[in-house]
Amino acid sequence: MGQNLSYEIKQLNESKGRTLSAIAKNISTIDENIPACKTLLVLNLSHNKISSIPSIVVKDFPALRVVDLSYNNIPSLVPEIALLSNLCEFSVSNNNISSLPEEICQCTNLVELSLDNNKLESLPNNLGNLVKLEKLTFHHNLIQEIPDSIENLSLLIELDASFNQLLNLNPLLCNCTDLRHLNASDNKISEINGESISKLTRLKYINFGGNNLTNLPNEITELINLQEFLLYYNNFSIFPLVLTNLWNLKVLDLQHNQIKNIPMQIASMLSLKDLSLSSNLINNLPKELSVMDHLIKLNLQENPLVSALQDIVKNHESKQITQEIYNVLSYGNATKGADIYLQQLEKLKEQYKQQIESQEMD
């Protein structure tokens, strides 16, 4: 297949083309005698079986701006990668790379760098040289820490460090003040540095799911633009009250923790539309839920709410149903094993509807 690639490059040279896409062409090797192409800007060789990139190839394509080598069998990168001084987007996701050459950080025009699904145990210490970087993803690796030079990535907008071995987020991340999207899920993080995260006020999305968190710092309230906060599969035993001060939060996921109660302060979360609390230890519903008309989805499955539902039915089935009761009961799908009570609640809700319709007719 190397010869076919050579043919395509010859064609590009003749036509002065700037893009070469050879996706899923079953390419396993790249011939070192491949013709040079000084004008090539975009090279996509993803979804092949390439096991190495000869250094001569890098030298022969000096104008490259976008390179996609994802989904191959590449175990390492050559130091000559530094010669691609115009490189803006580079993906080597889904390969077998165990380490990166420091020289990759000489590609100082990089805006997007994708390193996902490899075998990386660390990132280059000089990562901060990539001062134009806006998107950095290295999920599904074995990385234990983020280098201090991360503080120089002041233009970073998206960081995906999920599915690694991180014990904490480098406090110097606080200098990435343009950050909007932070995914650190499925690591080993047990604490969030409050002073550091309070500086990331432009964050709109945070995922800390699948870690070892037991509480949140009060400084979380500084994240005034946060809209989605995912904290599933952690070790919270108490609903973090600091969350109720995030007035712009729309989605909150606290599934699979050990939370026992929903605080009455939940009513202050005026933008909340989606609240997931399944697989906790919740045994009652606060009446404050009844005033949260903006809440579209409330997931309380797999909680010990059966007795609570039974009490609601027992106390109200022979009484006039109020708007407050109806609103609380409207959050169905509360818990498995409570089907019989949910059916009775549905009857109560239907009675309420009929009651309202009757009043309107009068």
Image: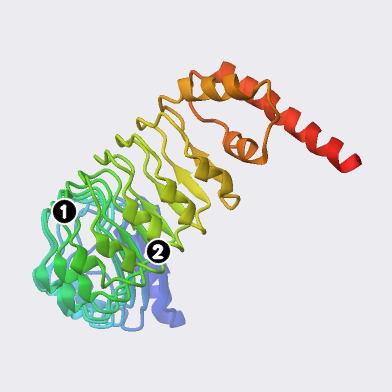
Q: Crowding at label 1, few (<14), some or many (≥20) Cα neighbours within 10 Å?
A: some
Q: Crowding at label 2, few (<14), some or many (≥20) Cα neighbours within 10 Å?
A: many
Return the residue nearer the eye: 58 or 150.
Answer: 150
Which quadrant: the N terminus? bottom left
Tag shown at residue 349: none
Q: Where does label 2 land, which residue?
A: 226
SS category of the residue bearing label 2: loop
The amino acid type of the residue labelled 2 equals Leu
Vertical side of 266 occupied by 358: above or below: above
- On the rendered structure, is 172 left or right of 267? left
Q: Are marks 2 and 1 in contact (CB under 8 Å)?
A: no
On the question of residue 188 being in view, the answer is yes
Label 2 – label 1 distance at C-alpha: 38 Å
Residue 27 figure quarter? bottom left
Vertical side of 326 occupied by 342: above or below: above
> As drawn, which residue projects farthest toward the front?
319
Q: Where does label 1 land, which residue?
A: 75
> As drawn, which residue projects farthest toward the right?
362
Which quadrant: the C terminus? top right
- On the rendered structure, is 228 left or right of 147? right
Residue 163 placed where, x, y %?
24, 48
The amino acid type of the residue labelled 1 equals Pro
The residue under the point 54% across, 30% down is 333
